[in-house]
Image (cartoon, helix red, strand yellow):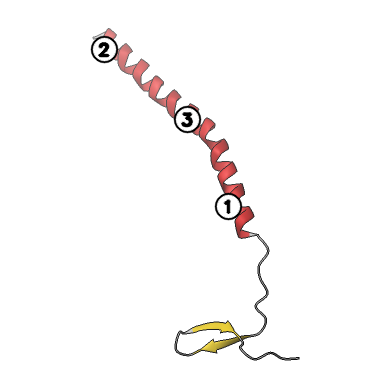
């Protein structure tokens, strides 16, 4: 019975070690992906000028008339 318990303990330690190692090594790629996503979100936005409410679509759209 002791060899079976030893093998179970070694197996559990191996699985735990694998999970810890994969989370440590995988965090670098997650960090790079999150930085790339943040760069896309903070990219310069376009100035649409004055907006007017479009009743049919239910959204704001750029104004069609130009104010000088």
Q: Is residue 23 above or below residue 63?
A: above
Identified at 47% across, 30% down, the residue is 22
| Residue identified by numbered label 1 | 37
Task: Kindly identify which numbered label has been placed on residue 23.
Answer: none
Query: Callout 3: helix, strand or loop?
Result: helix
Quadrant containing the C terminus in the rendered view: bottom right
The answer to which of 62 and 25 lies nearer the viewer is 62
Q: CA distance from mark 2 to mark 1?
A: 48 Å
State if disc 2 and disc 3 touch (CB < 8 Å): no
Residue sitting nearer the eye, 10 or 30? 30
Place of residue 18 in the rendered image (x, y in percent of width and height, measured from the top left): 43, 25
Outermost residue on the left side: it is 1
Q: Which residue is mark 2?
A: 4
Q: Secondary structure at mark 1?
A: helix
Which residue, given by chain and number where applicable, does mark 3 sit on? 22
Q: Earlier in the sequence, mark 3 or mark 1?
A: 3
Which one is nearer the viewer's eye here, 54 or 7? 54
């Amino acid at each position: 019975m002791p060899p079976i318990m030893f093998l179970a303990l070694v197996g559990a330690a191996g699985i735990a070690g694998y999970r810890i190692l994969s989370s440590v090594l995988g965090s670098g790629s997650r960090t790079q992906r999150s930085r790339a996503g943040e760069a896309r979100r903070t990219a310069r936005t376009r100035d649409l000028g004055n907006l007017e409410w479009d009743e049919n679509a239910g959204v704001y759209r750029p104004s069609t008339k130009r104010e000088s």
